[in-house]
Amino acid sequence: MSAEATEVRAETDNVLEIRDARVTFDMARGRARVLNDISVDIKRGETFGIIGESGCGKSTFGSVLMDAVEDPGITTGEVLYYPEEGAEPVDILDVTDRQLRQIRWEEIVMVSQAAQNAFNPTITVRRHFTDTFDAHNVDRREGLERAREVLEDLRLEPERILSSYQHELSGGEKQRALLALGLIFDPEVVVLDEPTAGLDLLVQREILSLLYELKEEYGFTLLFISHDIPMVAGFADRLAVFYSFNIIEIGDIDDVLLNPEHPYTRLLTLTHIDLDMAMEDVNTVEGETPDPINVPSGCPFHPRCPIADDRCVVEEVELRGEEGTNHKVACFYPDVATDRIPIHPSLVEGGEENV
Amino acid sequence: MSGEDEPILTIEDLEVHFTEETAVQQATPQAIREYLGWVPQPTKAVNGINLEIEENEILALIGESGSGKTTLGKAAIGLQEPTKGSVKYKGYDLQELHKKNVIDDMEWAEARQGLQVVHQDPGAALHPYKTLMASLQEPLKIWYPELSKADYRERILAMFQECGLTPVEEYEDRYPHELSGGEQQRVTLIRAMLLEPDLILMDEPVSALDPSLSIDLMDLMLELQDIFETSFLFISHNLEHARYITSQVGGDVAVMYMGRIVEYGDVDEVLEDPQHPYTQVLKWATMPMHPHEARERLEADTPLRSFESPNPDNPPSGCKFHPRCPKAREICAEERPELEEGDQWEVACYRRDQNHPYWDSEWLDEEGEMDIPV
Ligand SMILES: Nc1ncnc2c1ncn2[C@@H]1O[C@H](COP(=O)(O)OP(=O)(O)OP(=O)(O)O)[C@@H](O)[C@H]1O
Ligand code: SF4
Ligand code: SF4
Ligand SMILES: [Mg+2]
């Protein structure tokens, strides 16, 4: 590695560098490519938001970071993990099972969508903790000591929670206990996949506030996946918009939300129902979501894009941005998009419509 | 007092109680239970509910899990027997109709057909090993035995067309697992609509869908209502969905807290300027999309004394919201405010009345009053 490259790295201090990550599934109908050559860097300590419609590959991307794509899925590419600044990276897709077991949980954890059923109903929360300690060669007493602290940080009563079975906990308690289990080894990277799905409004809100505080206190890198923009809008330093198994727009949160340049991102903002605004402004992104076996040619958004032309149908489009900015977009005509496709009025300064 | 000009549903002083007992308690003879002082305390799942739903109306019911919204919904369509009070379908009491089977020219079967339900989990409503056509024909066979198979198919394909499941011939042979979440939810709506009901109870129908699909399904409901004049009782914990579905037809919203309706009125007015502190807190909890506003909201103090909802088996005294209410004064812990017309609409909170002794009562604790920034 050249001295120059090392220097750039030191400046940016990436915790993860993902290169050409691809996931395929062979199915009766053909080969499904459910993650399509994603390359992206995650900075140490940042909160990285991921949004996009159902089925666009968000959870798959999260799984790839821990090489946890389910069989018979095949993952290729590189996921370089830098345990600390300046350290030699390891490729998570190319480590021994032993190393992987250690990295998952101690270094990178994912608390996923199905959290409500993640606990084994026949054992107590304490057992979940002690089993985890055993698997990672951690002394149970010391571990439980730490568990109590983390549970308290999550505003739970440690003793009651530890001695409970999952059915004795409310949805919000279960979700927080699961977060505590994820944070128990002070991981470097935390991936949250729809962490408030299925929870009541006030419980969701409590978990958001808690995460916001904990993030500061624990200092982990946070990847926050949701299909709901408002869930990540207040958290994220950067935002990536997924469409058709790839990133189609990425940048600092203000750039991507207040100045979106991809037609899909702009249309996606219009799906937000604002309690103080007229319902006429609400819109859906019309058309079919792409089929992973049969992704459209050229720009995969062209069948739904209001400004697509012939070029979009034939030519492949890549993430590009202007020199010196973080804001990148996979569209041939970002200026036309900005001109012709409105965004949600609440994102426009002064609340005026940007048509 | 019954007939065509009656509302589809009239709910009067409805109460539903559940008694939770352990297996040991249930197995113990009554005399011994009494001797041991095991008198089961019923939990009032819903209490003091009065509602009317007219033809072609949409009412949104908002509340947290455990607030009783599903119990109220079930009672409204005859799936849950009231402990007290009554539910009338076109003027006929559902319980009486159930017992007698026929009153005047109204039959129990007609009421059952007229009141349908769509659940949160679309998977549960469809048979996993049957094609959509086979699954959807089943209810038609029961309710329209006089029609032929070709008639059933025609009706089903027409609904597919109406609901955007096209090409229809491709969809009829599909199995539920070959549908996306949004499509499955559309099929369960079709299943309910095929019976030409007067009212459909939609219990959290879009809470598992992404924003675009949620809007699609709600738009579909509105279109179907336009054609068939169906009424909807729409249950949700999401204010945004409640507003979207009701606002466009000038519908109402009812906010439930611990079994009671605490605020009721026109959806746009109520959500723009909620009067009950609980509704205000729900609005506060609904995150804005603008990144700066959202961040501000996350950094601000929570306008709640406690996030935890109280144990329904042991409800708080007075106003049930007082242990969490950011505006609670001592009087709130003593007596329960009724749902009454205020300056604007119905609210169950003392603050609706400028002259109420509430205003001279001491704050509940040293915390005093909390701001609800909405
Ligand atoms: N085990 C699997 N076999 C085949 N296809 C799969 C499998 N798991 C996921 N997929 C497909 O991969 C694509 C991406 O799925 P993924 O779960 O990553 O989406 P998502 O963006 O997380 O969606 P949601 O918002 O609904 O959670 C989808 O088309 C999905 O059907
Ligand atoms: S590249 Fe073409 S089709 Fe794709 S988003 Fe841009 S304008 Fe639309
Ligand atoms: S009556 Fe008192 S406790 Fe109840 S909502 Fe009003 S202010 Fe709050
Ligand atoms: Mg997912």
Image (cartoon, coloured by chain):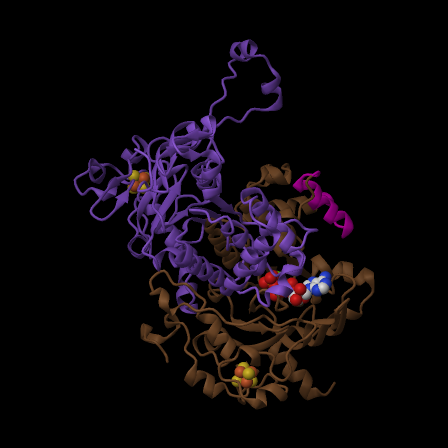
Chain in purple (letter): B
Q: Could you say which quadrant of the image residue A107 lies in?
A: bottom right
On the rendered structure, is A53 left or right of B89? right
Which of the 4 quarters of the picture holds residue B77? Answer: top left
Q: Colour of chain A?
A: brown
* Magenta stretch holds residue A129: yes
Q: Quadrant of ligand 2?
A: bottom right
Between A35 and A216, the one lying in front of the other is: A35
Residue A105 figure quarter = bottom right
Please give the range of residues in magenta. Answer: A122-141
Q: Quadrant of the N terminus of chain A?
A: bottom right
Q: Would you say residue A100 is visible in this rendering?
A: yes
In which quadrant will I find the C terminus of chain A? bottom left
Vertical position of residue B303 compared to residue B52: above or below = below
Residue at x 30%, y 30% (from the top left corner) = B334
| Residue in the foreground of this view, choosing between A104 and A290 | A290
Residue B289: image location, x then y, percent: 43, 66
**Percent position of residue A282, x then y:** 41, 67
Query: Which residue is located at x 49 percent, y 84 percent?
Result: A307
- How far from the left and from the top, in percent, is residue B135? 63, 50
Does the image show residue A88? no
Q: Nearer the viewer, residue B365 or A38?
A: A38
Looking at this view, name the residue that lies furthest to the left: B355
Q: Which residue occupies 43% across, 61% down?
A: B223
Q: Nearer the viewer, residue A253 or B196?
A: B196
Figure check: B83 above or below B164: above
In screen coordinates, is A146 left or right of A262?
Answer: right
Specify the principal SS of the magenta part.
helix
> Where residue B187 sits in the image (x, y, percent)?
56, 56
Q: Compared with residue A118, is residue A252 higher up or lower down, i.e. above or below? A: below
- Is A119 covered by the magenta stretch? no
